[in-house]
Amino acid sequence: MQSKEWRDERLDWSTLPEHPMDLFAIWHEDACKTEPWEAGAMLLATATPDGSPSARIVLMRGFHAGGIRFFTNYESRKGQHLTVNPRFAATFWWPTQVRQIRAEGRAERLSRAESEAYFAGRPRGSQLGAWSSPQSQTIGGLGVLQEQYNQVEQKYRDQAVPCPPFWGGYLLKPSLMEFWQGGANRLHDRIVYKSTGEGWALCRQAP
Ligand SMILES: Cc1cc2nc3c(=O)[nH]c(=O)nc-3n(C[C@H](O)[C@H](O)[C@H](O)COP(=O)(O)O)c2cc1C
């Protein structure tokens, strides 16, 4: 396979924001303009109780200075992991920008009110789907899901679908964030932000 020559872009140390989520916002906005599909897709890693890593893609659904939100079934495998050990690692890869962002820290459940507000804005089919899928559990076949879907559809006919108690969001609160910009000759640029408790310390790392 031919190796790819990447555009040579460097991060300007003098203009780097003090807060990593400000740089995240700029890069995410760039990615939204160029990525053909979902700029919000991230690889989320959790750990099993015995410490084995476990990773899957989830969709970011909003972010702010405090962290990154995503939604899921709290009883899923990842939900069970985070209950025992809230530590996470997450990675975004935006090929059109030749950029990667890594975040590590602790996940916290969103308030019930925040999860319910988000759920209320989802398409009805997704709301019914959330009730129908015992995420991460073994099922006998797809027919089981359809049957459960039909039942909840019937149950909530002519009424709003409430947010299931087992479904909601997490805030991924980073204590470390790394911004990786692809460069020529494999001399990529990496800027790492580490939380000091009061603010953020920045350093450049070798690629
Ligand atoms: C593009 C994409 C987006 C996804 N978004 C989510 C999501 O936002 N929330 C979620 O629970 N699962 C999402 N999934 C499914 C997860 O990857 C995973 O299969 C599911 O959450 C069960 O994972 P677990 O058994 O490790 O808990 C997404 C999958 C893909 C491929």
Image: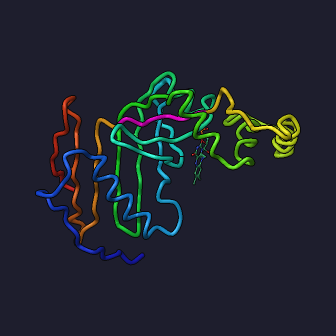
Please state the horizontal and vertical placement of residue 136, each as a whole percent of the image: 67, 36
Q: Is residue 140 above or below residue 98?
A: above
Q: Is residue 102 above or below residue 172?
A: below
- The C terminus lies in quadrant: bottom left
What residue is at 53 percent from the left and 49 percent from the top? 59
Please give left or right for residue 134 compared with residue 8 in the image: right
Magenta run includes residue 206:
no
Q: Nearer the viewer, residue 15 or 186?
A: 15
Q: Is residue 31 above or below residue 59?
A: below
Q: Main secondary structure of the magenta part?
A: strand
What residue is at 28 percent from the left and 39 percent from the top? 176
What residue is at 22 percent from the left and 69 percent from the top? 9
Find ligand 1 in the image and state its quadrant: top right
- The N terminus lies in quadrant: bottom left
Q: Nearer the viewer, residue 82 or 171?
A: 171
Please give left or right for residue 92 compared with residue 72 in the image: left
Q: Nearer the viewer, residue 202 or 153?
A: 153
> How many numbered marks have been drawn onto this rendered protein structure?
0
Q: Nearer the viewer, residue 51 or 85?
A: 85
Q: Can you tell which quarter of the image residue 11 is in?
A: bottom left
Q: Residue furthest left?
A: 14
Q: Which residues are magenta?
A: 168-173
Q: Is residue 183 visible?
A: yes
Please state the horizontal and vertical placement of residue 188, each as a whole percent of the image: 23, 63
Magenta run includes residue 169:
yes
What residue is at 52 percent from the left and 60 percent from the top? 38
Please state the horizontal and vertical placement of residue 61, each as a whole percent of the image: 51, 47
Please give left or right for residue 150 compared with residue 179 in the image: right
Q: Can you tell which quarter of the image residue 201 is in?
A: top left
Please give left or right for residue 31 compared with residue 159 in the image: left
Please state the horizontal and vertical placement of residue 110, each as a whole percent of the image: 50, 30
